[in-house]
């Protein structure tokens, strides 16, 4: 069936639509998957389903003030579409960029919005997935079948952020808001605001609100590493002055940034104390003389055990210096009617509390999967290179990097998927299923990620839901772009990890 002409016709007739590939999610991963599939496997029919009313995923959903990337867009952007703006971009700029990818490549005709996938069932007899999707806001259900399922549904629950339960919350008379579910009409002008948490969201929201708010207090249990720099790229600016083609600029600047990021990642591993000192010295230059950096900005963990939060132009620290924002490092004992009381006994009053306390991990969108009628518990599976799962046929999941831009991995996984689809054609098979080899029988199996390597709270809270890993590169999500950029394209599709039938 052609992917273009018959979608609506068949849906209206209440029939089941079949596609070679079904992509779940039209965020940066899903749109990238659609682009690569169209380029590298033009013979395959495909559809992209998304529950939202537009593309962009994370960048479509979040509405809090100042929402922006904390990665540079030369590497967070796709490798195939030059980024021409400032490195750190707002959600609107990212959406504009993605919109151009969709329009320039005529991908819109493949995307179906308002389609919430509710189940995915594999039939070995038919070698197909059956996917049901409900039209958002209605009870109309659509059924699709697909030979291959490409899961690009992200990694966290959109509708509900993580807010810890503190005693006395119900007695607080002000408003409590999580940045993930930001009321678009929220008026914070002239208000005394308490922001709980000190990650990338706080680093964004505080400078964005500081101008209108009366004052902002940032309350953190423990500090985060920040790094700062100008929101500009000198190399890109110079190349533009020389009137170099944007395609070249994108590639050259990407390579330079990735080269520099690799050096920092290596430094974090080999000389963490040196890197720590460098990071702290950098932020000291923005803070007032004698500021208590030890208490408020010196984390207990090694740099890069959690994501480093980037502060363009040091804007967060400018707010602190100007007295518009104050850091408090302490723990909440209880909410009161007017704010919070801390374990130290100190009271903080606030008209508005913002809980920038993270999100809930969502494994494969929480969609119930089954294979021949048996529900899949992903925790019982072992991951094949952080993108497929033992015993689960014809399905790939995009989970990007934490220490490098997410999209770098989305591009790599797209190449891998297209290569795998071609390989299946060459072999004349319908099914590919990761399976531990005889030589893997005694391999130690452990949780998805080594907490000593990377340990943000949202991951640690949900390890029991995630697939597991082995101790060989084939059975791990390594989080190392610099190894994977060579390893994934070279991965031997016939090394026995993938069983073809
Ligand atoms: C505020 C914020 C800032 C971030 N900044 C960066 C950054 O600067 N750099 C970086 O590398 N990473 C960043 N990240 C991580 C970021 O989420 C990813 O980089 C990236 O945007 C994820 O893209 P994605 O397409 O994989 O998933 P998402 O953006 O999460 O999109 C998933 C899509 O799938 C759809 N979907 C989900 N479930 C279903 C279903 N059941 N049925 C149908 N559709 C479904 C959703 O509607 C959504 O459109 C940030 C995350 C957040 C929350």
Image: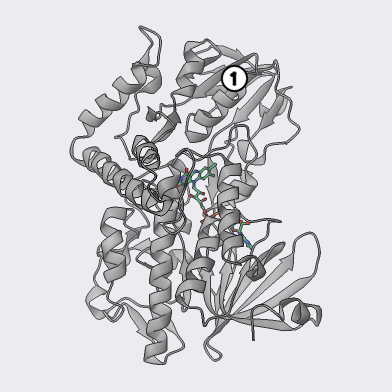
Q: Which quadrant: the C terminus? A: bottom left
Q: Position of residue 26 (x, y in %)?
A: 59, 60
Tell me the residue at 76%/32% (across/down): 185
The colour scheme of the drawn protein is one colour
Residue 388 drawn above or below residue 154: below
Q: Residue at x 53, y 21 (%)?
A: 218
Determine whether 126 is above or below 472 in the image. Answer: below
Tag 1 residue: 210
In this view, the residue in front, 385 or 341, is 385
- Seen at 71% across and 29% down, the residue is 170
Residue 347, by quadrant, is top right
Answer with left or right where residue 254 lies relative to residue 73.
Answer: left
Residue placed most toward the observer, 205 or 229: 229
Q: Nearer the viewer, residue 466 or 151?
A: 151
Disc 1, ligand 1: is the CB inside 8 Å? no
Percent position of residue 30, x then y:
54, 62
Q: Circle 1 sits in a helix, a strand or a loop, which is it?
A: helix
**Residue placed most toward the observer, 158 or 228:** 228
On-image quarter of the N terminus: bottom right
Residue 255 visible in the current orientation: yes
Locate residue 283 relative to residue 73 in the image: left or right: left
Q: Residues within 10 Å of mark 1 (few under 14, many from 20)?
A: many
> Which image quadrant is residue 192 in?
top right
Residue 387 seen by the camera: no
Q: Is residue 44 left or right of residue 445?
A: right
Residue at image coords 26%, 39%: 264
In the rendered image, the vertical position of residue 81 relative to residue 86, given as above or below = below
Q: Position of 59 compared to 41: left or right?
A: right
- Residue 186: horizontal and vertical position, in percent? 73, 30
Q: Which residue, as the protein is rendered here, is positioned at the far top?
A: 289
């Amino acid at each position: 069936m052609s992917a273009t002409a018959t979608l609506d016709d068949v849906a209206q007739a209440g029939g089941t639509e079949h596609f070679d590939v079904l992509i779940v999610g039209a965020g940066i991963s899903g749109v990238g998957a659609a682009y690569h599939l169209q380029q590298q496997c033009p013979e395959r029919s495909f559809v992209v389903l998304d529950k939202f009313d537009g593309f962009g995923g994370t960048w479509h959903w979040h509405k809090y003030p100042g929402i922006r990337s904390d990665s540079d867009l030369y590497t967070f952007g796709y490798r195939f579409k030059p980024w021409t703006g400032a490195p750190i971009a707002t959600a609107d700029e990212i959406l504009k960029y993605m919109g151009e990818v969709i329009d320039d490549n005529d991908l819109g005709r493949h995307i179906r919005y308002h389609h919430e996938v509710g189940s995915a069932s594999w039939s070995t007899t038919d070698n197909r997935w059956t996917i049901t999707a409900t039209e958002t806001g209605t009870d109309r259900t659509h059924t699709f079948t697909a030979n291959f399922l490409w899961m690009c549904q992200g990694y966290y629950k959109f509708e509900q952020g993580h807010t810890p339960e503190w005693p006395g919350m119900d007695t607080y008379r002000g408003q409590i808001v999580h940045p993930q579910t930001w009321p678009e009409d929220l008026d914070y002008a002239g208000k005394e605001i308490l922001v709980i948490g000190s990650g990338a969201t706080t680093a964004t929201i505080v400078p964005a609100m500081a101008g209108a708010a009366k004052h902002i207090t940032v309350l953190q249990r423990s500090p985060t590493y920040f790094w700062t720099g100008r929101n500009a790229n000198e190399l890109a600016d110079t190349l533009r002055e020389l009137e170099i083609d944007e395609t070249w600029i994108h590639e050259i600047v990407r390579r330079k940034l990735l080269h520099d990021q690799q050096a920092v990642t290596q430094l974090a591993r080999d000389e963490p104390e040196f890197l720590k000192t460098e990071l702290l010295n950098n932020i000291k230059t923005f803070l007032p003389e004698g500021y208590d950096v030890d208490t408020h900005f010196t984390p207990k963990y090694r740099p890069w055990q959690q994501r480093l939060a980037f502060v363009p132009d040091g804007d967060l620290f400018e707010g602190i210096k100007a007295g518009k924002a104050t850091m408090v490092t302490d723990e909440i004992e209880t909410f009161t009617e007017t704010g919070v009381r801390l374990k130290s006994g100190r009271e903080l009053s606030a008209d508005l509390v913002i809980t920038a306390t993270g999100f809930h991990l969502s494994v494969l969108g929480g969609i119930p999967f089954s294979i021949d009628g048996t529900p899949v518990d992903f925790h019982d599976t072992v991951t094949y290179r952080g993108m497929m799962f033992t015993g689960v046929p014809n399905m790939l999941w995009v989970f990007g990097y934490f220490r490098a831009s997410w999209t770098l991995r989305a591009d790599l996984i797209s190449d891998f998927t297209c290569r795998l689809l071609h390989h299946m054609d060459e072999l004349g098979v319908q099914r590919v299923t990761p399976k531990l080899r005889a030589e893997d029988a005694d391999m130690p199996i452990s949780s998805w990620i080594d907490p000593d390597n990377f340990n943000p709270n949202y991951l640690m809270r949900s390890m029991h839901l995630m697939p597991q890993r082995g101790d060989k590169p084939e059975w791990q999500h390594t989080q190392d772009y610099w190894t994977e950029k060579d390893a994934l394209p070279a991965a031997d599709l016939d090394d026995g990890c993938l069983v073809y039938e």
